[in-house]
Image (cartoon, rainbow, N blue to C red):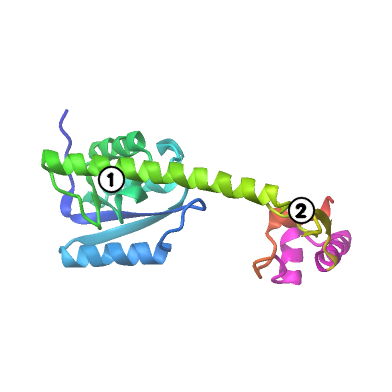
């Protein structure tokens, strides 16, 4: 089967970030890819950002799906990622994404290189994909090991429930957060909606930001 390819001088870029990895910010990734395009005389027609795991199935990667659909309308022959591990950290999944990209008239390219077409280039890409997959496996192993150490020390493991803190080996009420929970219930009793309550309270979550609608609703039901 033959495919009609878009222009090799027009690119659509994908920025992938996830909670499981330490990585460049979306802005840094996009900036690096823009510089790659500038140096190589490529027009960066669109940038899509997705916040997904490195092993999220293709049909669940909505940002990537949107980028694939944008290739032909933009006459883009390049689907650009920052590096091989931004495509995915699964060898089979990466190959699937590359094949799907070809069906949409483009080729996967990375701003950090390894874009040659020889058999040796293909071998190097496969090696890098395998390394990325192994790095993810090691990250999972190290995380499990760290959690086991914390449990052995009697430290709290997992997300701390809002309204509580860990002290002397057990969960105890956090007075400041308990007061906020009571305030939320009082405002709800006055007829305020969750978004209104969030705006009224301001930045009161543990990251110094307003509580989300879903979290407000959960706290109301406590």
Q: How far is disc 2 from disc 1 in space, using C-alphas?
A: 45 Å
Residue 89 located left or right of residue 205: left
- Say which residue label 1 marks: 128
Residue 84 located left or right of residue 157: left
Name which quarter of the figure residue 184 lies in. bottom right
> What span is colored magenta in the figure?
176-205
Magenta stretch: includes residue 198: yes
Which residue is depicted at the point 31% across and 55% down?
Answer: 13
Which residue is depicted at the point 43% across and 37% down?
Answer: 57
Pointer 2 local density, CA inside 10 Å: few below 14, some 14–19, many at least 20? some
Residue 21 pos. (x, y %)? 47, 53
Q: Nearer the viewer, residue 9 or 167?
A: 167
The answer to whether residue 157 of the structure is visible from this angle is no
Name which quarter of the figure residue 47 lies in. bottom left
Magenta stretch: includes residue 102: no
Pointer 1 local density, CA inside 10 Å: few below 14, some 14–19, many at least 20? some
Q: Earlier in the sequence, mark 2 or mark 1?
A: 1
Q: Nearer the viewer, residue 164 or 48?
A: 164
Position of the N terminus by quadrant: top left
Which residue is depicted at the point 40% across and 66% down?
Answer: 27
- Say which residue label 2 marks: 217
Q: Nearer the viewer, residue 115 or 153?
A: 153
Dot 2: element: helix
Residue 157 located left or right of residue 174: left
Residue 1 located left or right of residue 27: left
Residue 19 pos. (x, y %)? 52, 53
């Amino acid at each position: 089967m033959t495919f009609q390819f878009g222009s090799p001088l027009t690119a659509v870029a994908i920025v992938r970030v996830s909670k499981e990895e330490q990585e460049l910010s979306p802005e840094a990734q996009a900036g690096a890819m823009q510089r790659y395009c500038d140096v190589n005389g490529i027009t960066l027609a669109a940038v899509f950002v997705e916040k997904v795991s490195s092993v999220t199935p293709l049909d669940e990667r909505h940002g990537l799906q949107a980028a694939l659909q944008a290739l032909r309308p933009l006459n883009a022959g390049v689907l650009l990622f920052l590096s091989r591990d931004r495509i995915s950290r699964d060898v089979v999944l990466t190959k699937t994404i590359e094949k799907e990209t070809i069906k949409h008239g483009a080729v996967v390219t990375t701003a950090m290189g390894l874009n040659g077409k020889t058999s040796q280039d293909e071998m190097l890409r496969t090696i890098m994909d395998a390394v990325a997959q192994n790095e993810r496996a090691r990250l999972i192993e190290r995380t499990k090991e760290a959690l086991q150490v914390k449990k052995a020390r009697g430290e709290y493991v997992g997300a701390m429930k809002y309204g509580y803190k860990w002290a002397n080996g057990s969960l105890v009420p956090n007075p400041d957060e308990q007061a906020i929970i009571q305030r939320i219930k009082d405002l709800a009793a006055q007829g305020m909606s969750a978004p209104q309550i969030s705006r009224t309270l301001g930045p009161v979550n543990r990251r110094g930001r307003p509580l989300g609608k879903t979290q407000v609703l959960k706290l109301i039901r406590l």
